[in-house]
Amino acid sequence: MTGYSRQLESRAYRASTQLQARVRRKGVGKLPAVYCLAETVLVSHSTRGRISRGERGRFLAAFSEWTALVEEYRSRAEATVYQADLQQRTYWTHVVRAHRDAAELPGSGPAEITLDPIWDKPDILFFLRPHHEDDPAATRMIRVVTRALELLTDP
């Protein structure tokens, strides 16, 4: 791996980290709303045995807004990684053309630049911070939102 390859990989990682921070910053007001509306859905279901159309609509609208935000930034992260990987492959093509013996070295060739695994998580798991997955408050939020979604999607 060359210095340029490491620079491309580092740039893609930094961009992904910045995009994650932006999702959380923009979602600061959206996440509590999704959580509160999910709790309303659960309380209505447990006390009345049914969920009103209004409660259903408000929760699904808030959740859809949140997932659209996450998807927008996930797409940006994917595009950044794709571009960095493409630059690396183009660079390596030129290295091999200029130095034919470089292609014959064991382990030569570019390592694929991949997307940060946090972007593979389902949208509701963005409640969690990357290294604090045992956070009880975040875990409760996920359980509540997941249960509300189950209630609204079960036939």
Image (spheres, helix red, strand yellow):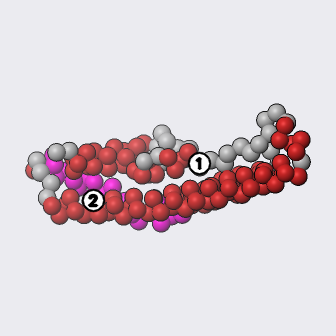
* Residue 149 percent location from the top left of the image: 27, 49
Q: Which of the 4 image quarters holds residue 139?
A: top left
Q: Which residues are magenta?
A: 21-46
Q: Which residue lies most toward the top here?
A: 106
Q: Nearer the viewer, residue 16 or 101?
A: 101
Q: Which residue is mark 2?
A: 60
Marker disc for residue 116: 1
Residue 65 horizontal side relative to residue 84, left or right = left
Q: Per the image, is 39 magenta? A: yes
Disc 1 secondary structure class: loop
Q: Earlier in the sequence, mark 1 or mark 2?
A: 2
Residue type at mark 1? Asp
Whether 108 is among the magenta residues is no
| The N terminus, quarter of image | top right
Image side of residue 91 versus residue 61, left or right? right
> In the rendering, at what x and y percent does residue 21 appear?
56, 60
The secondary structure that most of the magenta stretch takes on is helix
Q: Residue at x 71, y 43 (%)?
A: 111
For the C terminus, the quadrant is top left
Tell me the amino acid under the disc marked 2. Leu
SS for dot 2: helix
